[in-house]
Amino acid sequence: MWAPGPWNNRLPALSVSQSISSVCCFSCCRCWASGAHGRQRCRGPASATTQGHVACRHQNLTEVPTPSLRLAQAVVFCGRATLKGPKSRMWLASRSLPTMVLEEDMVSALETQELVRTKGPRPHVGLVVLSLRSPPPQLTQRLDLQGNQLKVIAPAAFQALPHLTHLDLRHCQVELVAEGAFRGLGRLLVLNLASNRLSALPQEALDGLGSLRRLELERNLLEELRPGAFGALGALVTLNLAHNALVYLPPMAFQGLLRTRGLQLAHNALSVLAPEALAGLPALRRLSLHHNELQALPGAALAQARGLARLELGHNPFTYAGEEDGLALPGLRELALDHGALQALDPRAFAHCPRLHTLDLRGNQLDTLPPLQGPGQLRRLRLQGNPLWCGCRARPLLEWLARARVRSDGACRGPRRLRGEALDALRPSDLRCPGDPAEDEDEDEEPAAARPRAPPGPAEEDGAAQPCPRACVCASASRHSGCEGRGLQAVPRGFPGDTQLLDLRRNRFPAVPRAAFPGLGRLVSLHLQHCGIAALEAGALAGLGSLLYLYLSDNQLSGLGAAALEGAPRLGYLYLERNRFLQVPAPALRALPRLFSLHLQDNAVERLAPGDLAGTQALRWLYLSGNRLTQVSPGALGPAPELEKLHLDRNQLREVPTGALEGLPALRELQLSGNPLRALRDGAFRPVGGSLQHLFLNSSGLEQVSPGAFSGLGPRLQSLHLQKNQLQALPALPGLSQLELVDLSGNPFRCDCQLLPLHRWLTGLNLRVGATCAAPPSARGQRVKAAVAVFEACPSWASRKAKRMPSARRARVKGRWRGADKVGRWGGREA
C-alpha cells in the first residue's frame, strides 16, 4: 500500500502482467531472474502470461529450469512516506537500483532489523532491497518445455510448482523418468510425455499424480509395462500408449485405473494379451488396438472390460473369427475389424455382443459372409474392399440383411454379370443358383476371379516383377501370400522372404516334405486346411522360427511326431480339428514349450492318459470337443499351471472327471455340455473351486444333482449353464453369491414342496433364469420363481413367513389366507 507523501506522483503505473512476471520467473522466460551469471533476461519464444502460463520451448535446456522469486522489501524514507510490497519491487527493478543478495538464513535477522529515517532539512531516501532466491509463489499453472534436451527427469523435479495443472514435455529426448519425478504435482491434470525416448517406466515414476486426468505417452520406445506403473493414477480418464514397441500385455498391467474411459494401444507390436491384462479397468469404454500383430480375437482379455462400447481391432492379421474366440461384451456398440486378413467368419462370432450396432469389416478377404446370430441391434455392416462373390451362397446374407434391417455397403467382385454391383442394391432373386439359366458360365469364374486373398501391392500395380510362384498372389503391402484352391499337388516355393501370412488352403498335398518352406523365417501364420495332408515329414517346418499359428484342420492326419514340428520353437496356436487322431499327439506337444492354444475338436480321441499333456506348461486353451472320450484319467491334464479354458463337450463322459481337474489352479472355463452325465455327485468341481468362473453343463441328460455337487464353487463363479437337461428338482445354491447368469431353461421342473428351497433361492436372485414348471398341471408353464400359489401349500411356507414378518403383519396375512377380511387382504388397517 502507498502511504501519503509527495513521491506518489513520481512512481510509474504498473500492469498486472508486470506484477506476475516479476514474482514468478524462470531462467528461460522473459523476466528477470537470478542465476549463476547474475541477473539476465531471456530472449526468444519463451513467454509468461497473466493466466500463469509459462513457455520455454526449444531453448536447448538440459535440465528442468528452476524458478526464482525476487522477494524484495523496499523501504523508502521521504518524510513520512513509506513504499512497500510488489509495486515497490517492480519500481526498484525497473530502475536497476543496486541490490543486496542475501542467503535464506539472513532473512530473519533483516526482517527484525530496525531501519531509521534519515534526518535533515531536506528529505533523503534510504533504500534496502532484499533479493532472495526461493521457491516461487505458486502461481504458474501451465508449463510448456517442448523441444528441449532434458533426457532425465530427476526426482522431485517440479516440487517447486505445486499449482501446475498442465505440463508439456514433448520432444525433450527424455530417456528416463526417475522414481518420484512428479511428486508434489498433486493438482496436475494433463501430462504430455509424447515423442520422447522412454523404453520403460519405473514402478513409482508417476507417484504423486493423484489428480491426473490425461497422460500422453505415444511415440516412445516402451517395450513393456510393469504391473503397478499406473497404480497412483486413480483419477486418470485417458491413457495414450500408441506408437510404442509393446509386444505383450502382462496381467494387471493397468491396475489402479478405476476411472479410465479411453485406452489407446494402436501402432504397437502386440501379439499376445494376458487374460487378466485389462483387469482393473472397470470404467473403460473405448479401446484401440488397431495396427498390431494380433492373429486371433483376444476374447479372454477383452472379457475383463465388460463395459466397452467401442473396440478398434483393425489392421491386425486376423484370418478367422468365431464363437470360440470368446468375445463377450454385453455393452459393445461399435466394433472395427477393418483392413485385416479375415477370410472366414463364424455365424456366432458376435453372439455374445447383443447391443452391437456397427460392424466394420472393410478391406478384408471375405468372399462370403453368413447371417450373423446374436447381435440383434446391428444396424450397420461395412463390407467395402472385400472380394464378395454374389452367387448362390450369398442369398442367405441378403435375406438376413433385409429381415434384420441392416444397412450394408460393399460391391460384388463376381460373377461377371454382377461385377461392381452394390450389395445393398441386390435382391435375393438376383443371385443365381446351380440350375438357373446361364449360371454355369458365371460360376466357372469363381476360382480364378473371386478368390484372390490379398490385394496387389504397389510394386505389382506398377508392373514390377515380384518373387512369387505362378498361380499365387503375393501382396507386398500386407506381406500376405496365397495360393488357395489352385489345385496344387506340391507345396510351391519362391515366396517373398518377408511373407508373414501364407495361405495354401484347399489344395492337394498328401504329405508336407522336409524344409518345405525355405526362406520364410518371418512367417507368422501358415494355413494348410483342406489339403488332404496325411503326414508331416521330419523337419517339415525347418526354418520357421517366427511361426506362431499353424492351421492343419480338415486333413487326414492320424499322428504327428516331434521331429515334424522342429524348427518352429515359438509355435503358440496349433489347429488340428477334424482330422483322424485316435489319441493326443503327446510327443509333438512336448516339442512346443510355448504352446498357448491346442485345437483337437472333432477327432476320434477315446481316452486321455497321464502324461498326454506333459511339457505343455504354457498351455492356456485346450479344445477337445466332439471326440469319443469316455475317460480322462487323473494326471492327464495337470499339472497345467496356466490352463484357463478346457472344452470337453460333445464326448461320451458319464461322470465329471474330478480327479483330472487336480493341478489346474488357473482354470476359468469348463465346458462339459453334451456328455451323458445323468448325475452330479458331491464335490464334483471342488479342485477348481477357487478359480472357475464359467461352467457349462447344458444338454447333458442330467436327472439328479446332489446337494453338495457345487460345494467349493463360491464367489468367483459368474455363469452356470444347466439348460436342456432332465432336471425335475434342483437344490438351492446359496453359496454361489456372485452369479451373473444362470440358465435353467428347458428342464421339466416339478413344482412341489421338494422344489421350495430352489424357489426361495431364485426369489432372492435379480436374474432371469428361465426355469418353468412342467408339473403339476395347475402350474404348467409358470415360472418357478413366480409360482407362489403352488408353494404356499407347503408346510414350511407358513413357518418361514412367520419368522420373517412382525406380529401385526403376520395377523393380517393370516386373515388374508383364510379369506376373512377384505380390508386386510389389500393391506389396509383392520377396524
Image: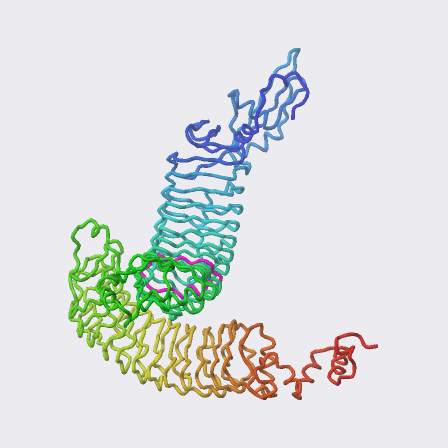
Which residues are the magenta region? 295-317
- Counting from the top left corner in percent of width and height, residue 59 is at 39, 34
Q: Quadrant of residue 675?
A: bottom left
User: Taking 398 as reference, is 191 above or below it?
Assistant: above
Q: Residue furthest right?
A: 831
Q: Is residue 214 magenta?
A: no
At 34% across and 78% down in the image, what residue appears?
624
- Quarter of the image where the N terminus is located: top right
Q: How many marks?
A: 0
Q: Residue furthest front?
A: 437
Q: How is the image coloured?
A: rainbow
At 44% across and 32% down in the image, what residue appears?
46
Query: 173 and 567: which one is in front?
Result: 567
Is residue 114 in sight in this rendering?
yes
- Counting from the top left corner in percent of width and height, residue 117 is at 65, 19
User: Taking 76 as reference, is 264 above or below it?
Assistant: below
User: Taking 775 as reference, is 71 above or below it?
Assistant: above
Query: 168 and 328: which one is in front?
Result: 328
On screen, residue 287 versus residue 125, left or right, reads: left
Query: 30 and 491: which one is in front?
Result: 491
Is residue 292 in sight in this rendering?
no
On screen, residue 222 versus residue 459, left or right, reads: right
- Counting from the top left corner in percent of width and height, residue 552 is at 26, 72
- Counting from the top left corner in percent of width and height, residue 773 is at 56, 84
- Quarter of the image where the C terminus is located: bottom right
Q: Is residue 303 magenta?
A: yes
Q: Residue furthest top?
A: 121
Q: What kind of secondary structure does the magenta stretch mostly adopt?
A: loop
